[in-house]
Image (cartoon, helix red, strand yellow):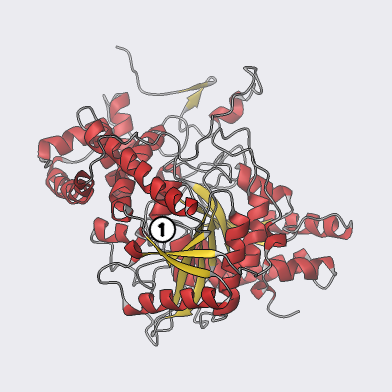
Amino acid sequence: MSIDKDTAAKVAKLARIKVEPEELDALAVEFNAILGFIEQLNELDVEDVAPMTSVTPMRLKRRADVVTDGNQQEKVLSNAPDAREGFFAVPKVVE
Amino acid sequence: MSDLTKLTIAEARDALRQGEVTSVELTEACLSAIDQADAFGAFVHKTPDIARDRAKAADDRIKAGDAPAMCGIPVGIKDLFCTEGVPSQAGSKILEGFLPEYESTVSGQLKDAGAVMLGKLNMDEFAMGSSNETSCYGNAVNPWRAGNSDAGLTPGGSSGGSASAVAADLCLAATGTDTGGSIRQPAAFTGIVGLKPTYGRCSRWGIVAFASSLDQAGPMTKTVRDAAIMGTAMMGHDPKDSTSADIPVPDFEAMLTGDIKGKVIGIPKEYRMDGMPDEIETLWTQGREMLADAGAVIRDISLPHTKYALPAYYVVAPAEASSNLARYDGVRFGHRAKLSQGDGVTEMYEKTRAEGFGAEVKRRVMIGTYVLSAGFYDAYYNRARKVRALIKQDFETVFADGIDAILTPATPSAAFELGKEMTDPVEMYLNDVFTVTVNLAGLPGIAVPTGLDKQGLPLGLQLIGRPWEEGDLLNTAYALEQAAGFVAKPAKWW
């Protein structure tokens, strides 16, 4: 599988990272080098192997479904690049 | 007392308890050492005021006679740990200005034990790198130099600042994190001890996430004893991390007897790589002899899927990273790009992430996005998870056959020159060839300095243990450390 310029552009879009058109060729070359390295995995027969879901065989702990904190609006917003009137502010989303 | 910064945690603890030194004196000595060592780029956010306050409080606590082992010990904290009110950027521009409103569980446990935070330590951006060259702060530099050369060497990565600071005696110990070798490789490159605990031993809460199924925090120290002391303080169950193990943490230091008679040490043949330098091969042989002399039984073993660990890692880790790093969108914290007229929310995400992430992080986020995308998920991600299961099975098989620990080289070479390997990402990835299997299998691993190469640079060996048996692993490491008698220090040039 080889990645071309269009696929590189699509991946950048999916990842929400702006890549200038003139950088796409170089990006595709890098992707192909890394994916070429990954292709080694195809040498193995993994037909009957179950994919790992958890590295330690443990049941995730459950906690009581109760409120344990809250009322931290100021703290939650304190690092926001743009916070107004108790909300995160972003460019207009809905026309 | 002279050379306070050169003390180990154990020595400092004993001196503090006997009243021979105060934490304030220790802390001042470290703060002045740090100020003289800006050339390393190790400490990227210094916190002298916090350090002095905590040192005073620690002295009071020690005087009251009820202080835990870490009380009054000056340490550095990797920038990946969120520390309340102190910059925590994960080495990334995208978290510039971020001041956490909370403290990570691990740094909080150290704080509660009375440890003194001196500042935040340099690292590869989001812990993605093996040379500390992807940091937004610039390189961290290794205090060691090759022969008479004054070329800057890498301290390794991603915990490069931690390694450099401990090796240069700027602090008594430091925290690190290890996703594919980020504690053990820098420890080996700088002649210190680095322990990656079993996955689930240290809470990941409040540590900036890279690859959640692989990330694990651990101590970086001058000796194995110190790793035992600091490890005990860092580990433990945390209800805030659902993968944190509810298993009691023993007093690891009490388990250091140095007696390894009858322990079975496995030597995996697949770790003998083509083109491996003779010095690494010799070091490995010497380590094997040292353990045999200490009474261990050496057995050749096979871990047949070793070769596939790195490629599997470079699917799993970027996949998880692409998901974890989706939160950096310019909305809740950190950097937001300046927008042009008419830009909407998508442009805000795209520009913010393009400006905020460095090249290696972008590369891995996009690779992760690709391997998880529709049509490729099975071919890449699911296949990698299956290979990961096989790698774990390799270890389970040898442990079931009676192997107590596995001895391997820690790195394929000594520290290399800064700038040398940055050009080829895949070449850089090979640094983790001996360490990455341990993360994929969730096992504990430790790097112990055991020798110098012909240029006078430190080299380390790695021991891999059974899950949850850090105590036994540390004891084997302790025996290896005793036998190797590594005492070399970098010559001071700074």
**Residue A65 higher or lower than A52, as above or below:** above
| Mark 1, residue position | B435
Q: Quadrant of residue B17?
A: bottom right
Q: Quadrant of residue B146?
A: bottom left
How crowded pointer 1 is (Cα within 10 Å; few <14, some 14-19, many 20+) is rated as many
Which quadrant, please, contains the N terminus of chain B? bottom right
Secondary structure at numbered mark 1: loop
For image coordinates 37% across by 59% down, the residue present is B130
Choose between B90 and B194: the one closer to the eye: B194
**Most extreme residue toward the top, as rendered?**
A95
- Is residue B90 found left or right of B60 in the rendered image? left
Q: Is residue B79 visible?
A: yes
The x and y percentages for residue B163 are 51, 65
The chain letter for the residue carrying disc 1 is: B
**Residue B383 higher or lower than A85, as above or below:** below
The x and y percentages for residue B419 are 30, 67
Q: Is residue B73 visible?
A: no
For image coordinates 81% across by 60% down, the residue present is B59
Amino acid type of the residue tagged 1 in the rendering: Thr
For image coordinates 74% across by 55% down, the residue present is B53
Choose between A10 and A20: the one closer to the eye: A10
The x and y percentages for residue B279 are 36, 79
